[in-house]
Image (tube, rainbow, N blue to C red):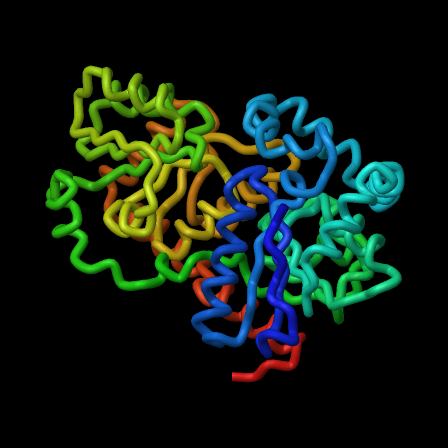
Amino acid sequence: MTEQLGSSESSPRKRILFLFSDTGGGHRSATEAMIEALEDEFPGRFDTRMVDFFRDYYPSPLRFAPEIYPPMSRLPQAWGFTFKAFDTRGRAKAVTQISYPYVRRGARRLLHENPADLIVSVHPLVNTHLMRAMRHSPRPFITVVTDLVTAHALWYDRRADLVVVPTEEARQNAIGFGIAEGNLRVIGLPVAGRFSDPQGDRDEWRRRMGWRTDLPVILLVGGGDGMGPLKRVAKAINDARLDATLVVVCGRNAELKADLEAVDWKMPAHIYGFTTEMPQFMAASDMLVTKAGPGTISEAFISGLPLALYARLPGQEDGNVRYVEHLQAGVWTPRPREVVDAVRRWVEDPDARAAASAASRRAAKPEAARQIARLIADQVGITS
């Protein structure tokens, strides 16, 4: 059972309940970024609580959603079909109406055990359930959308007091799903403050990590779980024998890390598992090869990295690819040879790399977490 938030009798601090789930790393990291920003902007003024509603309160098999997500995401056609099948106002409403009796007891218990002055949701599959469960005891509710562009209809419930979206494209999408313009705020995706902090001398970091300082660095990542075709992409870059250093972050995928460590590398290469130093990795790199996840894209923008996007979740991340290409901050490279072509250009043409880097940096919204923190504070009557 989750620990309850401190009561108003024992503390004057406002209680904020954040609802997320570890179905992908982005929901957790966005939540942690907002909590960090609240403490930085309003030290000692808030009690915050993160609740994984699937794992802690929903019945089986939904409670296993964090475990189900990784294998599901490796079936892109099935994922895309499911996403699009219910991505209308009518179908989304039908899904939540049908599923509510099944989750009602858990939703009510969640609210009872976690009293709060304000609820912030960063996940589309809890919004309508929670607002229906608290119809007899309403409280302020903010939705922070963590998909950059093509956010599913399930994100949007008109009963939310505010809906925060990361881009103008997402705002238009929200309006199309019935959210009033006055209830929308375009702010950005909340990203941890350390991505904006000065990272020091990059050459010194490279020397400390054993990277060469005279070559551009290609950073290849696949999220915290090392998902996607990282092995094929890494081997294609290696076979191209580019005049660069390759850095691969395998996340928690120990098997992938072991496989890549056994490769006969024809270029300088460094293989890592899960790391909490991604801001330093990005700051010391010259380009990023990644799947089209919204959190990683937003972090790359702040770091000013050109992006080669090698995979996307159909429906959910289609808009991310279009967005990055429209900004000229990166390219869509779904085949390993296309990844090689993109990074070769940036390795061999510093001007092209600089132009993509500048476009990436222009798209950055490094203050998003702090702006959302101030919005939360305003909703509960706290001023700096």
Point out residue 44 in the picture as x, y percentages from the top left corner.
48, 75
* Residue at left offset 86%, top offset 44%: 93
Point out residue 179 in the picture as x, y percentages from the top left corner.
78, 60
Residue placed furthest toward the front: 10
Q: 312 or 109: nearer the eye?
A: 109
Q: 350 or 381: nearer the eye?
A: 381
* Residue at left offset 65%, top offset 48%: 123
Residue placed furthest toward the bottom: 384
Say if 344 sits above or below 198 in the image: above
Compared across the picture, whether 21 is left or right of 227 comes to right
Say if 316 sits above or below 196 in the image: above
Q: Can residue 142 be seen in this view?
A: no
Point out residue 158 in the picture as x, y percentages from the top left corner.
81, 59
Q: 149 or 162: nearer the eye?
A: 162
Point out residue 272 in the picture as x, y percentages from the top left corner.
28, 33
Compared across the picture, whether 81 is left or right of 48 comes to right
Rendering quarter of residue 267? top left
Say if 314 sits above or below 349 in the image: above
Compared across the picture, whether 84 is left or right of 317 comes to right
Q: 2 or 184: nearer the eye?
A: 2
* Residue at left offset 48%, top offset 58%: 33
Rendering quarter of residue 336? top left
* Residue at left offset 56%, top offset 67%: 47
Rendering quarter of residue 117? bottom right
